[in-house]
Image (cartoon, grey):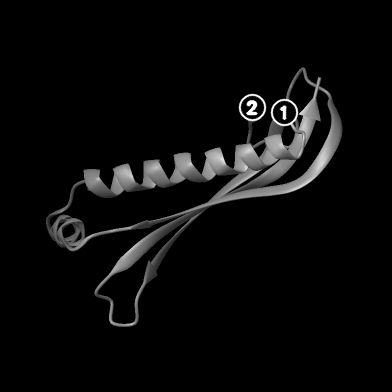
Amino acid sequence: MIVSTTPTLEGRRIVAYHGVVTGEAILGTNVFRDFFASIRDIVGGRSGSYEASLREGRELALGEMAEEARRLGGNAVVGVDLDYENITSGNNSSSMLMVVASGTAVTVE
């Protein structure tokens, strides 16, 4: 499955459009990761655990989107967009990471 952020694929001709496809991943974070990330906010640096969560969410969302494209008969997805959102509960005691991938399923030759 070819997945691209561009609307076309160089050297390939799109012969059929199958529609918009999406993939969603929602991952829970935990108290310890949130605590250590808040320390990183104060002292600076990168949060490896959050980076790993972002990577996992992206891979899950892209995989789900590609599978939907395959079910529709496509062999590629073009115009892919990724959106990330942090979802917190009303009391801010827990949060979740949402990753959404969307694009257009196509058949290329």
Task: Name the residue rendered at 34%, 82% in the picture.
Answer: 90
Closer to the camera in the image, 5 or 19: 19
What label does residue 75 carry, if any?
A: 1
Compared with 25, 88 (above or below) is below
Do the CB atoms of the residues marked 1 and 2 lie less than 8 Å apart?
yes
Q: Residue furthest bottom?
A: 90
35 left or right of 96? left
Closer to the camera in the image, 61 or 73: 73
Q: Residues within 10 Å of mark 1 (few under 14, many from 20)?
A: some
Alpha-carbon distance for marks 1 and 2?
5 Å
Mark 1 residue element: loop
Q: Residue furthest right?
A: 15
What amino acid is found at the position of numbered circle 2 in the picture? Answer: Met
Task: Pinpoint residue 7: horizontal percent, then vertical percent.
Answer: 73, 37
Task: Name the residue rendered at 31%, 44% in the picture.
Answer: 51
Task: Pinpoint residue 95: horizontal percent, then vertical percent.
Answer: 32, 67
